[in-house]
Image (cartoon, rainbow, N blue to C red):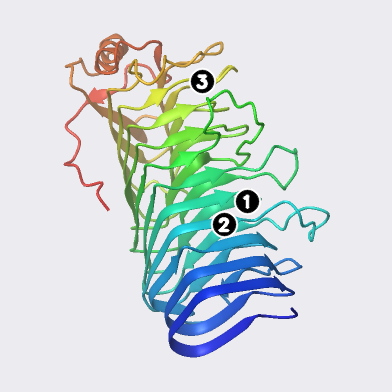
Amino acid sequence: MTNHAFLIRTANNIVLNDLQINNTDNHALDGQVVNNLTLDNVDIVLAGDADNEHALNFKDGTGANLTGTVLIDNSTFTTFAENGLYLENFSGNVNLTVQNSLFNEGDEHTYCSGIGCGGHGLLLRADGTGTMTVVVDNVTFDDMTQVGIDAAREGTTNLNVTVRNSFFDPTPYAGNLDDTDNGVRLFGISGGSGNTLTFLIENNVFGDTADGDDTDGDDFQGTGGIVLVRGGGPNTTLQGIIRNNTVADSRASNGIAIESNGANAGSSTTRVRAEGNIIRNHFNHGINVLGNSSLNSSDNHLHDVALMNNSFTTGPSGSGVHAMNVSFGDYNRGCMRVTGNFGATPGTPPALGTSTSRIRFRHTSTPGQGQIQMESLTPFTAGNDGSASAALSADNNGTTPISFSTTNSVTPANCSADTYTP
């Protein structure tokens, strides 16, 4: 079939069910200004044969490309040239649910310089104004050449993302751009102002599900983390929970990364809780909390982060990497809860390389430009690394070693109330 199978413009209440679309030379479905859409038991195979061609395309308009209630259920999308679904809205509200489905980019095509075209399962952009709410439940993302779910907000939009009960299987490592980068990547793009990115990522499996020994060679290759959430922009909020996931098989990055981009004017807020996750085979830090240095002395980037009851079955083998790393640059303030980690179940604490720590705190050494406070179940003395280390060890199943790169600087605090819930 040549060109698009479906071209939809300015339409309401579209329902496609019990349908198979094979071998389109462009997008299988191309839509603009569509309100309310259902795809039920739809199979799309071999969509597109060049870069920037997708199974489902809703990105080329300048306003509300797809709005209302959108449901993709019991459907499969296999061997698409770039993305399974590409949705970009510049206005309007959309509630998107994807469930009980499969996205498999496949490695059969070589349309872009002999490899895949850098595809995503879901590529979602909330720009301009409006709200995008996304629920992904019981979906498999297999053999992506970039990211399973890549979602970002910019402008004054709000983006709310829930990912649960899903499986992310990376491509076999080939040492090129055909390798999967991340499982889930959520960005608050720099330049946005006064908006929120909220999320819930729970009960998912990222990586090898067999026995954790990484024998199949399928690894995540991207920088940041297998699960990466990043805030940014002035007066913006990144808020959510990452819990009860298995996060495995990183060849080039962290397991879970919680970041804020401080290189923007205006303050931002990051409230994230990572709890009950099993993290294994991480090339870099198991969990990395990063506040990038701000360029503005008037800024006050706030971080309220809880790392609770996470387990690490195998860990980094090189030096300079840590099971849990917290690093804040200039003009970042952090209040940390770090409790219940490194339990005996489901596995032993990670094997550590030379000069590594199970828990490491680091912030700028410039007086007044950055700080880390810690809420501890065990009392400790402010400005005393030995006391703080003993408290952290007691709160985390007796784990050691623990390091503070800026000496005698951590102070006790009562962090704000639990406001992580999206």
Give percent across and percent down for residue 275: 32, 34
Residue at horizontal 62 percent and vertical 51 percent from the top:
144
In the orientation shown, which residue stands out farthest toward the front?
18
Residue at horizontal 41 percent and vertical 70 percent from the top:
71
Mark before the other along the chain sequence, 2 or 1: 2
Q: Callout 2, which amino acid?
A: Phe
Q: Residues within 10 Å of mark 1 (few under 14, many from 20)?
A: many
Give percent across and percent down for residue 260: 42, 46
Q: Which mark is residue 144?
A: 1
Q: Callout 3, which amino acid?
A: Gly
Residue for badge 2: 103
Q: Residues within 10 Å of mark 3 (few under 14, many from 20)?
A: many
Mark before the other along the chain sequence, 3 or 1: 1
Q: What is the secondary structure assignment of the residue under circle 1?
A: loop
Q: Nearer the viewer, mark 2 or mark 1?
A: 2
Q: Is residue 331 left or right of residue 412?
A: right
Does 291 sit above or below residue 118? above
Residue for badge 3: 315
Callout 2–callout 1 Cβ contact below 8 Å: yes
